[in-house]
Image: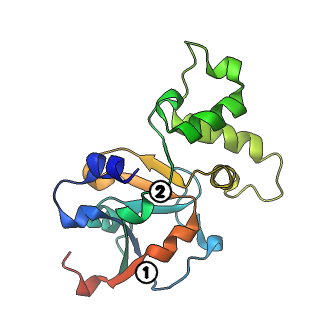
Amino acid sequence: MLAKLKSMFCKKNKELEYIWHATGHCFDKFDDEKVGSSTIKYGWGIYFSYTRKGALEQNGNAKYLYRIPNKALSNNVFLHYSNQLVEQDEIIKKLARKWYGNKTFSKDNFYRAGQGFYNDIFESERQNVTDPNGCAAKYLRKNGISGGIIDGEASSRIIVLYDTSLWSHAECIKIEDSDT
């Protein structure tokens, strides 16, 4: 997975060896209750950018940057929101076969991208839980999927971490100390 991340996002730039999150607070442990307090455009999770600039654009009032090295994500599986399910990692394809049924998933005309899969899970799961906040991300995390990747231009590429334990790899940097 690390090689995939590097080939997709790293361009011989040290900054791109990390994913970046901007916030107004410095803390050691991420509080799951805070997820979704500012945005949930692509579902529940901790939103990171592939560039420092992108993180700062997402939160203009930020006082701190957090960065996680891409190598800390190397053994994790990510749902690519824009890719068809048949193009995803084997763990995701196996879960999709289970979700939609092997007969449906195997049809030549079965087209479903990662974001559609996430939305289908959300629509189904929210009816089965008391608190629907994060139900799709938590379902995916329980099934071995650590987050989602949303493609865009370099500064707008987003990774959403469903697995908030990955926050343990985050390093806090005061913005005035960083060379932004």
Q: Is residue 35 left or right of residue 159?
A: right
Where, quadrant-wise, is the C terminus in this rendering?
bottom left
Q: Amino acid at mark 1?
A: Gly
Q: To which quarter of the image does residue 57 belong?
A: bottom left
Task: Identify the residue at image location x=67%, y=56%.
Answer: 138
From this viewpoint, which residue is outermost toward the top?
108
Tell me: residue 90, above or below residue 180: above
**Secondary structure category for the residue under label 2:** loop
Q: Which residue is mark 2?
A: 75
Q: Amino acid at mark 2?
A: Asn
Residue 37 seen in the current view: no
Q: Which residue is mark 1?
A: 24
Tell me: residue 35, above or below residue 94: below
Query: Alpha-carbon neighbours of circle 2 within 10 Å: few (<14), some, or many (≥20)?
Result: few
Depth check: 37 or 45 in front? 45
Determine which of the numbered discs, if any, sits on residue 12 in the image.
none
Task: Identify the residue at image location x=45%, y=86%.
Answer: 26
Percent across and percent down for residue 97 are 66, 29
State which mark lies toward you, 2 or 1.
Answer: 2
Q: How much space separates mark 2 and mark 1, taking CA atoms?
A: 30 Å
Query: Alpha-carbon neighbours of circle 1 within 10 Å: few (<14), some, or many (≥20)?
Result: few
